[in-house]
Amino acid sequence: MITEPTTLFALLAGVLGLVFWLSKIPALGKVFNFLPPVIWAYFVPMFLTTFGITPDANALYSWMSKFLLPAALFLLMVTVDVKAILRLGPKALLMMVTGTVGIVLGGPIALAILGGVLPADTWQGFATLSGSWIGGTANMVFMQNYIGAPDSLLGPVIVVDTVVGYGWMGILIFLSTMQGRFDKWVDADMSLIDDVNKRLQEIDTERRPALTADLAGMVGLTFVAVAISIWVANNVMPESTYIGAGTWAILIVVTLGLALSFTKIREVEKPGASQVGFLFLYLLLTSIGARADLAAVLDAPLYLLAGFIWISFHVGLLILMARLIRAPLFFVATGSMANIGGAASAPIVASVYLPAMAPVGLLMATAGYILGIYAAPLCGELLRWVAGMF
């Protein structure tokens, strides 16, 4: 078993590098389209721990959660183009927000239905999962810390996230062949697609290769912001039963990043600051997988049923909204994946429906990251309240 933190970090980083190297091999393209690198970043370390190669608890994992999570979120927030998101138009954003509401309410409904036959701490696992389904993996780690869910719950949570979440992604890809029938059924206003496409052309997408000075500047800025946020959280903000110093640190660093996104600092995206943020996030993912207990997957059948109920409510609400505002199936799919799959999956699904519309999926997923930081705790508190009834 590898327990020395530096060696353990090298192994996890090596696993991540291997996964992304394999994902670029053309012959494996289809495999990684349906099972993106994010899945392998979870499961390869999980199996390493299961076979005794890596430990399920180590000081390295705590360090990565404390520093890589806020660093990733800061870089993702400071590079957000809020104006570009708003250019998507009210109906596109309404579908994304509807998907979020479906997750916030669907979890408590699923727990209310199955709470009597699930373990007492299930609500903590569901709260953790809600973070993943509103804004992606970074929010999942945030919610685990916010709720205080034990690592033993990560096993079934990851199984549900993968099986139900990516199973739904597969269904959405299949449904792309039925766009015409769905759009006819809801009497879809197809001018929405043309309007969004026109707005996309107005977005500045200037990119350039990153120089050493760029990387040094963005990494330096990031960790200064993280250090300031942690200091303020520990020394200034009030600590309560529900909001501890770790939660305050995340909320502060995210809000700071969003505020800076309205300044010239957002130009750090030109040399690819968000990609550095995703690198931090994927490294964090490997430590999450390594902490997961596969023995806890024995609880997965009931978790899977709850996940099915949960996502069904989410989908039903999206379809109802699509019918009300005459939104095409494209917006149902991207609005759903912007929540359930995040930036790793939403562009893929969007491009399957309309190849030129991949940026829509990415922008909606980015909006999901922002909304999720504030909406997922609401879902967690609703789950806590429902759990108290059993």
Image (spheres, rainbow, N blue to C red):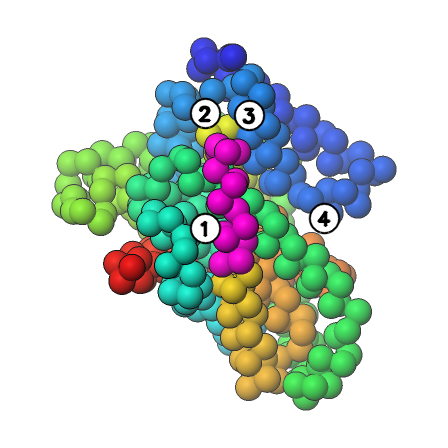
Q: Is residue 302 magenta?
A: yes
Estimate how packed mark 3 is, as few (under 14), some (14 to 19) or many (20 or more) residues with alpha carbons within 10 Å: some
Q: What type is the residue that disc 3 sits on?
A: Thr
Left or right: where 15 falls relative to 266: right
Q: What type is the residue that disc 1 sits on?
A: Leu
Q: CA distance from mark 2 to mark 1?
A: 20 Å
Q: Earlier in the sequence, mark 2 or mark 1?
A: 2
Q: Residue at x 41, y 56 (%)?
A: 117
Residue at image mark 2:
56
Q: Earlier in the sequence, mark 1 or mark 3?
A: 3
SS for dot 3 = helix
Q: Is residue 164 magenta?
A: no
Q: What type is the residue that disc 2 sits on?
A: Asp
Q: Earlier in the sequence, mark 1 or mark 4?
A: 4
What range is drawn magenta here? 292-307
Q: What type is the residue that disc 4 sits on?
A: Phe
Residue 115, percent from left and from top:
38, 59
SS for dot 4 = helix
Residue at image mark 4:
34
